[in-house]
Amino acid sequence: MPIEIITADITRLDVDAVVNAANPTLLGGGGVDGAIHRAAGLALLEACRQLPESSPGIRCPVGEARITGGFALPARYIIHTVGPVWHGGDRGEPALLASCYRQSLQLAAMHGLRSVAFPAISCGIYGYPPERAAAVALAALRETLLEHVDLQVQLCCFDMRMAAIWRQAFNPA
Ligand code: AR6
């Protein structure tokens, strides 16, 4: 099965790439972004600063993805993506969230990577209801994986409650 749901600290995973739930500046923040920057070290911040801006201060628009090295992480690469802020669901949030998963996997495939771990993008500070996010994420992943049969995906939940929600979406009773 190319998709697995695990409970872990994503900064500890020994995979080809971990995905970061970033903000458009790509200069760090709270949540998993803060944890990844702390664990990867200041060289990550420097690499992010060097990524081109598409408009002032914006290195990664919502729904897109960028890649850097993993620096002090066990992971070889970090794929930074920016999920949508939840505004109730009628401002394009599902399509933007699906795009995060799709673009992250496409970037991984372009770099010849085989194993990618995702956090629950947008499900923390950005307020996306996790049940809805899990359904969107799984549909986008399943569809994209049809084109990239060599990729293995881990959905890395930070706690058991989140993992239970994702398992329910994965295997609805
Ligand atoms: N490993 C795995 N998952 C984690 C970890 C970790 N070490 N730490 C937190 N999570 P969030 P968002 C979970 O808020 O909602 C930042 O400030 C967390 O429990 O990190 O996309 C950025 O700079 C939650 O389930 O990301 C942006 O400004 C999930 O990761 C903003 O937050 C995502 O929560 C992005 O908000």
Image (cartoon, helix red, strand yellow):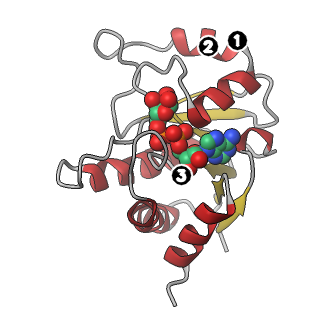
- Kindly check if marks 2 and 3 are in contact, taking CB atoms under 8 A apart as contact: no
Residue name at image x 47 percent, y 50 percent: 123
Ligand 1 position by quadrant: top right
- Kindly check if marks 1 and 2 are in contact, taking CB atoms under 8 A apart as contact: yes
Q: Amino acid at mark 2?
A: Leu
Q: Amino acid at mark 3?
A: Ala
Q: Is mark 1 within 8 Å of ligand 1?
A: no
Measuring from the top left, give residue 12's x and y in whole percent. Answer: 80, 41
> What label does residue 45 carry, if any?
2
Residue picked out by circle 1? 42
Give residue 47's quadrant in the image: top right
Characterize the local packing of mark 3: few (<14), some (14-19) or many (20 or more) Cα atoms within 10 angstroms: many
Give residue 65's quadrant in the image: top left
Residue name at image x 67 percent, y 30 percent: 36
Residue 22 in sight in this render: no
- Secondary structure found at label 1: helix
Residue picked out by circle 3? 120
Residue name at image x 55 percent, y 16 percent: 48
